[in-house]
Image (spheres, grey):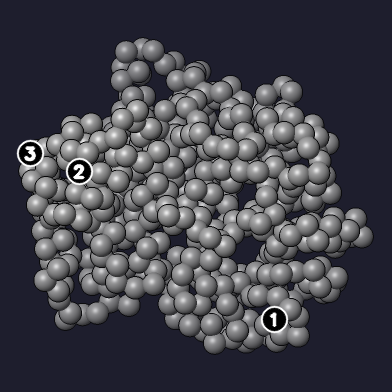
Amino acid sequence: MLRRMRSLLGLADDDDHPARTPSATSGQEAGKAAPSSGARIVPPTVQDGTACGPVLLVARQPVFDASGEVWGYELLFRHPDSPECCSGDVDASVATASVIADGFAMARPALGQGQRLLVNFAEDMLLEGTPRILPPDVCGVEVLETVPATEAVLLALSALKAEGYLIVVDDYAGQPGMDALLDLADIVKIDVLGRPLTDLARDVAGLRSRQCQLLAEKVEDLATHRQCEALGFSLFQGFFFSRPELVHGRRLDSSQAAKMRLLATLAREDVNIKAATEVVRSDAALSYKLLRYINSVHFGLPVKVTSIQHGISLLGTRNLVQWLCVTVLSEFDTGPMARELIAVSALRAKFLELCASRATSRARQMDAGQVDAGHMEAGHAGTGQARPAPQSGAMFMLGLFSLLEPLLCLPLAELLRSLPLADELTEALAAHTGPYAPWLELLEHYERGRWDEVLASGEAMGLTQADLAMAYAGALEWSAFFHDRRE
């Protein structure tokens, strides 16, 4: 079965050597794959946003260590849940293996040295050896709570552990019959959301004698984070990093205030390339970063660009403004989680921009009569009346500024006074109301892997499942390039 999966996924059939990193597929241009060495994943064929094979949703969530640095990420994905998700010669197991491999390829470029990716595996996939399509030095095998600790499962996990895979036991809550599985565990995950502190303390005490790390899952605020740390957890997953402890009365220092003024200039709808060019030319560090960006493998230019003016002309106004915004934001490094907050901000910005662009394209096709209801229904979206798509540039700014408050630990209302944004943007950021608020909701549903809500929100905006998947893939590739920790 594993050989058949590897063949269908386009992986080299070499049982003695686990597959190396598959290539990533960009969501910016359908069907365009980024170059990569080693094994390659053949992505589902997509034409006009409609999938000819399984198109599955993939997201990632950061896992932090006790110092606040990113330890790794968990991949969240939507399993194929109906025959329509798979073409005639690809069964559900292979489709799930495909999304695992594609999601892994998307997420790996952003990993730093020693960081891991946690991937969920059901019982049948463990028994079939599916984890071996991913490299053991990066992949953590997360055993779902529904997997029974049978002799066959334990043998499969023992073999994987011997090959270098991390074994992660998911959703432990002190349930009996887990001893043999816990003996193999490198990491044990405990869902802490809404659980009494006494129950958590009991579960932790029962694991204290074992040689495993404890990961607190669904940590939604800093108070819970501190409680878990005191109990002995060393890894933390959840959105506590987006809920800061605000420092009322503190003001931005002169350097931060200057950066906010620059962001305010770049956020203006009438910003022009001349003004953006002067910003770069007047700053030696920005000039260096721009030339390094333009001459990177991301662009693959045949000649080296040595002139700022030439580099800017190649980028164009929109790309230059986006690059400047993310670069300036990256200089607000105020704490151990700042790098991840900036990376998530960039990912959010590009995801919303690409979604808005695809929604606009969908609306134009509908107006021109190029897409009928049956065509859209096949893509699992767009059968209802979609909301008018906002400008993609405004959506970029919405995502980029959505985490300013935790980044600077100042009240958002105070920060927004420094950014004369359009009223719709301010309303969405400050109060989650107005015409742009549903786009923030879509974003948050996607980050948390709430796939039913994602599909419903996408449908309301005229986006197919393929649109959403490709937008996230493109955003992940784009943002990973800005924050390549391997350099």
| Residue 345 shown left or right of residue 214 in the figure | left
Mark 1–mark 3 Cα distance, whole angstroms, equals 61 Å
Mark 3 neighbour density, 10 Å: few (under 14) some (14–19) many (20 or more): few
| Residue 478 shown left or right of residue 230 in the figure | left
Residue type pointed to by label 2: Val
Residue 69, x across and y down, in percent: 46, 70
Residue 294, x across and y down, in percent: 29, 39
> In the image as oriented, which residue stretches furthest toward the top?
369
Dot 1 lies on which element?
A: helix
Mark 2 neighbour density, 10 Å: few (under 14) some (14–19) many (20 or more): many
Q: In the rendered image, which residue does mark 1 sit on? A: 203
- Residue at the location (60% across, 84% down)? 232
Foreground: disc 2 or disc 3: 3
| Residue 411 shown left or right of residue 103 in the figure | left
Residue 249, x across and y down, in percent: 16, 81
Residue type pointed to by label 3: Lys
Quick one: quadrant of the N terminus? top right
Mark 1–mark 2 Cα distance, whole angstroms, equals 50 Å
Foreground: disc 1 or disc 3: 3
Dot 2 lies on which element?
A: helix
Q: Quadrant of residue 417?
A: bottom left
Label for residue 281? none
Dot 3 lies on which element?
A: helix
- Residue at the location (78% across, 61% down)? 161
- Residue at the location (48% across, 83% down)? 226
Q: In the rendered image, which residue does mark 3 sit on? A: 274
Q: In the rendered image, which residue does mark 2 sit on? A: 321
